[in-house]
Image (cartoon, helix red, strand yellow):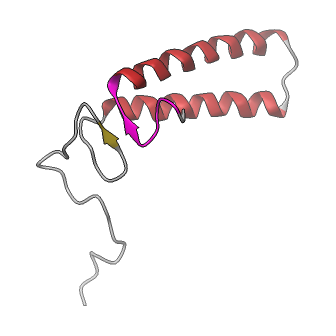
């Protein structure tokens, strides 16, 4: 994740990360079917699932915003809202 899904991203590195995560998922599925389930195995499975979600969401982002910088899409979308939300912004004083 650190090498391919860091702060500065590219579509190519995200695709590479997804391929590696898919390989890990396949290995885990094989291991999961043959061996006794342990807390460490469950935690590893959950970490791989979260990694996949992060990569897939990053691949859907077609803009750069804040610390999520994509070399393929260096600008924020022009019609997007603010990137910092304040919980008190909606309260009238």
Magenta region, main secondary structure? loop
Horizontal side, residue 55 vs residue 30: left or right: left
Front position in the image: 40 or 2: 2
Residue 89 horizontal/vertical position (percent): 28, 76
Q: Which contiguous range is marked in magenta?
A: 3-11
State the residue lying farthest toward the left: 78
Q: Picture quarter containing residue 29?
A: top right
- Left or right, residue 51 beside residue 90: right
Residue at 39% over, 34% down: 57
Q: Which of 66 and 29 is in front in this view?
A: 66
Q: Residue 50, position in %: x, y?
A: 56, 34
Residue at the image point whose x is 18% and y is 51% from the top: 80
Residue 62 lies, with reference to residue 68, above or below; the image says: above
Reply yes or no: does residue 19 show up in magenta: no
Against 81, is 23 above or below? above
Residue at 63 percent across and 11 percent down: it is 26
Q: How many numbered tags mark residues here?
A: 0
Residue 28: x percent and y percent?
A: 70, 16
Query: In the picture, which quadrant includes the N terminus?
Result: top right
Quadrant of the rendering where the C terminus is positioned: bottom left
Residue at the bottom extreme of this rendering: 93
- The image quadrant that residue 88 belongs to is bottom left
Above-or-below relation of 21 to 42: above
**Position in image of residue 52 (x %, y %):** 51, 28
Q: Which residue lies furthest to the right in this view?
A: 36
Residue visible at 63% across and 17% down?
Answer: 24
5 magenta-colored: yes
């Amino acid at each position: 994740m650190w090498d391919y899904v860091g702060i500065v991203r590219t579509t190519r590195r995200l695709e590479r990360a997804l391929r590696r995560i898919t390989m890990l998922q396949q290995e885990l599925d094989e291991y999961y079917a043959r061996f006794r389930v342990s807390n460490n195995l469950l935690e590893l499975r959950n970490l791989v699932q979260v990694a996949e979600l992060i990569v897939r969401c990053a691949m859907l982002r077609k803009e750069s915003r804040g610390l999520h910088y994509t070399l393929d899409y260096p600008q924020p979308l022009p019609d997007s809202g603010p990137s910092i939300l304040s919980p008190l912004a909606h309260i009238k004083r």
